[in-house]
Amino acid sequence: MKVTTSAGDVIELGPIETAPTIGIVDYSRRVTDDYGVTTVVERAFSRRMSVRLAVPFDDTGALQRQLATLRATPATWTADDRFASLSVRGFFKEFEVDHAVPPLSYCTLTVEGLVETAPIADAGGDPAVAGTSTLRLLQPVKITNDQAGQQQRSRNRCGRMVGVDDVPARRARDARRVAPRL
């Protein structure tokens, strides 16, 4: 993990111990009225990233002092140069040290990004190292109206789904079966 200050100074914090977690905080407004109509006003968002670092046991005090100097200072926090989603421009929000037994301590660092309006540019490829994961990315398939209609007709032939046009006739038929009791 490295930090690049506004002045261009690069500070190496240490290697990431496990996979970082990333997310966003959405400032859009969603309001649903008494009739169930939802109105959405799209607003900006900020990104969040949390990482766990492995730091030499004797260096945790120096790291804490170094981060204290970066307090309330915007910087670019980069967990991995290969992915745009793992680089956040903002402030560190929390820093915690788990003093384990020497030779290593583990530090958790949470970074909160500055407000953004555009999504990040990312290639969208498989982030796993080649040969280490069996996960495959699936690409969505666009279904046209012709394909959707054909699928609906085939379901009706099999009797698994009743078409929307059949509902009024079915209700009328059911209403005739039930006679009121006197």
Image (cartoon, rainbow, N blue to C red):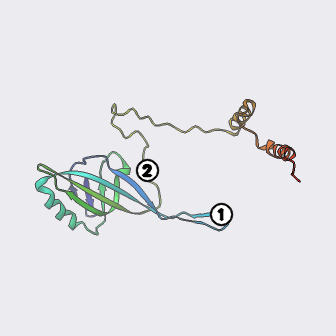
Q: Say whether residue 178 is left or right of residue 16.
A: right
**Closer to the camera in the image, 112 or 11:** 112
Q: Residue at x 21, y 67 (%)?
A: 69
Q: Classify 52 as above or below 150.
A: below
**x then y, percent, for residue 66:** 18, 63
Q: Quadrant of residue 115?
A: bottom left
Give the residue type at disc 2: Ala
Which mark, residue 37?
A: 1
Q: Which is more N-terminal, label 2 or label 1?
A: 1
Q: Residue furthest right?
A: 182
Choose between 8 and 124: the one closer to the eye. Answer: 124
> In the visual, does 43 lie left or right of 172?
left
Residue 121, disc? 2
Q: Quadrant of residue 167?
A: top right
Element type where label 2 sits in the image: loop
Q: Residue furthest front?
A: 182
- Residue 95 location (% of width, % of height): 25, 61
Q: Amino acid at mark 1?
A: Val
- Give 1 or 25, whichever is nearer the viewer: 25
Horizontal side of 59 relative to 19 (left or right) equals left
Q: Image point 82% across, 44% down: which residue?
A: 174
Q: Position of residue 7 (x, y in %)?
A: 25, 64
Q: Which mark is residue 10?
A: none
Check the image and report above or below for 101 versus 35. Answer: above
Identify the residue at horizontal 28%, vertical 46% (top origin): 18
Q: Residues within 10 Å of mark 1 (few under 14, many from 20)?
A: few
Q: Are marks 1 and 2 in contact (CB under 8 Å)?
A: no
Q: CA distance from mark 1 to mark 2?
A: 33 Å
Pointer 2 local density, CA inside 10 Å: few below 14, some 14–19, many at least 20 = few
Quadrant of image for the C terminus:
bottom right
Q: Position of residue 145 (x, y in %)?
A: 70, 40
